[in-house]
Image (cartoon, rainbow, N blue to C red):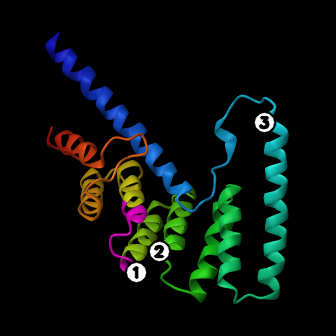
Amino acid sequence: MDENGKNVSKQTLFISIAVALLVGFLSGVIYSDRSPQPGGQIAQQPNLPAQNQQQDQLLQQIESLQLTVQQNPDNAQAWTQLGHAYFDTNQPAKAIEAYNKSLAIIPGNPPVLTDLGVMYRRNGQPDKAIESFDKALEASPGFEQALFNKGIVQYNDLDDLEGAIQSWRELIRVNPGAKAPNGIPLATMVDDLSKELQN
């Protein structure tokens, strides 16, 4: 019975950590001041017209930005904004293209590189996501969002628990008070994961 209790608490701990990490990754989306799309909400109540209106505005913004970059292809800011609009409408391949155009004009922009990494992950390219996060960290050592998201991809997509712990320990070194969005200190999560690794 004691053995079952240990298994249950381990499973509960693992699920809690996975949920915290997933929520943490979503905070990487919010990092760029863009709200995630409300597709996760099942209830279709009076919000539906507002959602449709928001979607229409985003589509108009995309059209306007496409015209801007067509007329001025050296406008890094417009390419970045177009990437953000594709990000917000869940078009990762197009976001990747737009972010790369922006980075070709102004290389080494840590927030853009981090958003690019998020889009590579969403596009099913975790290795490219890591590469993008590493470039962000090369440009700005200790860039917190890149470190956090790198750990997320290592943990969830590459089954690299050791690498994830290393990324998050670096984040804790930069910001000892770092917390997951649910309020759990990152140091506590890393300690729990380290114990999981040892078992």
The residue at which mark 3 appears reads as 47
Q: In the depicted view, which residue is nearer to us: 125 or 92?
A: 92
Extent of the magenta region: 138-147
- Taking the image as shown, residue 165 lies to the left or right of residue 102, namely left
Who's the residue at 54% across and 72% down the image?
Answer: 112
- Taking the image as shown, residue 94 lies to the left or right of residue 126, namely right
Who's the residue at 24% across and 58% down the image?
Answer: 169
Image coordinates for residue 113, horizontal then vertical, percent:
50, 72
Image coordinates for residue 37, horizontal then vertical, percent:
67, 48
Res 4 → quadrant: top left
The residue at which mark 1 appears reads as 139
Query: Three-letter amino acid code at disc 2?
Result: Pro
Q: Is label 1 in contact with label 2 (beta carbons under 8 Å)? A: yes
Q: CA distance from mark 3 to mark 2?
A: 34 Å
The residue at which mark 2 appears reads as 110
Q: How many marks?
A: 3
Image coordinates for residue 192, horizontal then vertical, percent:
22, 40
Q: Earlier in the sequence, mark 1 or mark 3?
A: 3
- Taking the image as shown, residue 123 lies to the left or right of residue 56, namely left
